[in-house]
Image (cartoon, rainbow, N blue to C red):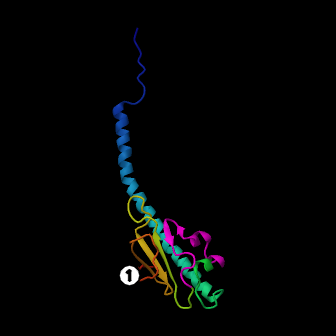
Amino acid sequence: MTKRTNDRGFSLIELLIVVAIIGIIAAIAIPNLLASRHAANEGSAQQSLRTMSSAEATYKSTAGNGNYGTVDDLVTQNLIDSTLGSGVKSGYNFTTGAAPAASATVFVLAAAPVTSSGVTATGTREFCIDQSGVLGAKAAASQTVATDCAGFTAVGN
């Protein structure tokens, strides 16, 4: 009579090889995923500032009677949404509240990453736009939004 063995399943070596392959794939994929997230957050911040700049022009020619408005004014007039008006969107801090000061000639809107370094960084650049409509960028120095566009280099497009 022959003895039947029930050797089913994976050996320890086979399991270790699978775990090693998964580790290699993760080591390749995670940096690309983080880079994609940074790019998406920065793209969102740029577009949000362009939206706010357009809203300023609309406000000046309508409800502002020739003056640019504050971020609160833009939200009140439904020119920007309350998420953007709250000051944090897609990993970036934005100009909020009573800033920029209402003026007939100038406004400055800016965005800075919530976290600018490390694995959890939401972005690596700050952005600024003013009444000229030129969007500028510079390496992130802080999480506080800029109050003027000095030192910013124009972004293409």
- Asked if residue 6 is positioned above or below residue 65 in the image, the reply reads above
Picture quarter with the C terminus: bottom left
Nearer to the camera, 76 or 101: 101
Residue 44 appears in view: no
Against 153, residue 27 (above or below) is above
Q: Is residue 64 above or below residue 17?
A: below
Quadrant location of the N terminus in the rendered image:
top left
The magenta-colored residue range is 75-101
On whether residue 80 falls in the magenta region, the answer is yes
Q: Position of residue 151 (x, y in %)?
A: 38, 81
Q: Is residue 149 left or right of residue 52?
A: left
Q: What residue is drawn where x is 43% and y is 66%? A: 123
Indicate the secondary structure of the residue bearing disc 1.
loop
Q: Is residue 145 left or right of residue 54?
A: left
Report x, y in % for residue 41. 47, 66
The residue positioned 56% from the left and 89% from the top of the image is 103
Task: Return the x and y of residue 20 as percentages of the image width and height.
Answer: 35, 42
Report if residue 87 lies within the magenta region.
Answer: yes
Q: How many marks?
A: 1
Q: Which residue is mark 1?
A: 151
From this viewpoint, which residue is outermost toward the top?
A: 1
